[in-house]
Image (tube, rainbow, N blue to C red):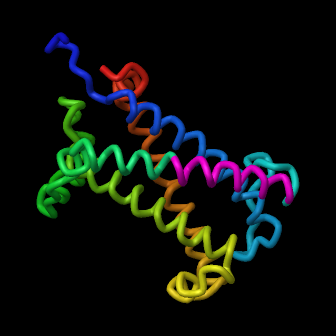
């Protein structure tokens, strides 16, 4: 293997990344259609960005993508932990380094010189997405099988609390995706490395 062309993202990482991306898009767009059935926050999501056509169709898409995200996300976490990538890429965390990197990002000077190493902003953002995804799964379980998970339901402030937590956790994930896509547009070689691995 050439030292000039090192493997940045192994095959398992690229596969789980793209499967997660597909699952998240389906879950968001079908979830927006499900939300529109009640619009419990007082505003609708434009139908043009929703998936499913009607509530029953949206629920079918949502449940299918739920299993994909759950299984694939679990594989992603297990591989990250087993290979040491979780500890090596995302830790340690430093509040001071995070502040410095956030300041550099605001100034448009955040370094991306070595794609094999994550800056502190990336570390915190990716860890946030992992935790947010867990919260989405747990709150989704309450919405799907509320009677079967009474302790979890109470922990998430009841069914209505879980519904709001699920929505706002999804909104946070959507915000991450938007920022992630902007960063990819600004540093396009990161997309190439996620496709080719090098």
Residue 116 appears in which quarter of the rendering? top left
Residue 130 vs residue 184, the one in the foreground = 130
The quadrant the N terminus occupies is: top left
Task: Write down the quadrant of residue 91 in the picture.
Answer: bottom left
The relative height of residue 27 versus residue 148 in the rendered view (above or below) is above
Q: Quadrant of the C terminus?
A: top left
Residue in the picture at 42% in, 31% down = 14
| Spot occupied by residue 128 in the image (x, y as percentages of width and height) | 37, 59
- Image position of 50 with respect to 117: above or below: below
The magenta stretch spans residue 167: no
Could you tell me residue 134's position as x and y percent? Answer: 46, 63
Asked if 182 appears above or below 152 in the picture, the reply is: above
The part of the chain drawn in magenta is 56-71
Q: Residue 106: in sight, yes or no?
A: no
Q: State the residue in front, 50 or 198.
A: 198
**Measuring 61% from the left and 87% from the top, which residue is drawn there?**
158
């Amino acid at each position: 293997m050439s030292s000039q062309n090192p493997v940045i993202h192994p095959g398992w990482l690229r596969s789980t990344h793209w499967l997660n991306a597909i699952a998240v898009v389906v879950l968001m767009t079908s979830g927006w259609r499900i939300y529109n059935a009640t619009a419990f926050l007082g505003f609708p999501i434009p139908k043009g960005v929703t998936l499913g056509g009607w509530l029953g169709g949206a629920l079918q898409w949502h449940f299918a993508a739920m299993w994909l995200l759950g299984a694939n996300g679990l594989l992603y976490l297990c591989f990250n932990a087993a290979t040491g990538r979780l500890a090596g890429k995302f830790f340690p965390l430093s509040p001071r380094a995070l502040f410095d990197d956030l300041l550099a990002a605001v100034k448009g000077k955040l370094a991306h010189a070595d794609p094999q190493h994550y800056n502190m902003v990336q570390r915190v953002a990716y860890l946030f997405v992992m935790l947010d995804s867990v919260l989405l799964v747990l709150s989704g379980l309450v919405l799907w099988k509320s009677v079967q998970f009474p302790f979890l339901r109470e922990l998430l402030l009841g069914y209505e609390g879980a519904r709001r937590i699920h929505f706002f956790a999804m909104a946070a994930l959507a915000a991450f995706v938007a920022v992630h896509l902007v960063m990819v547009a600004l540093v396009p070689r990161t997309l190439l490395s996620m496709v080719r691995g090098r």
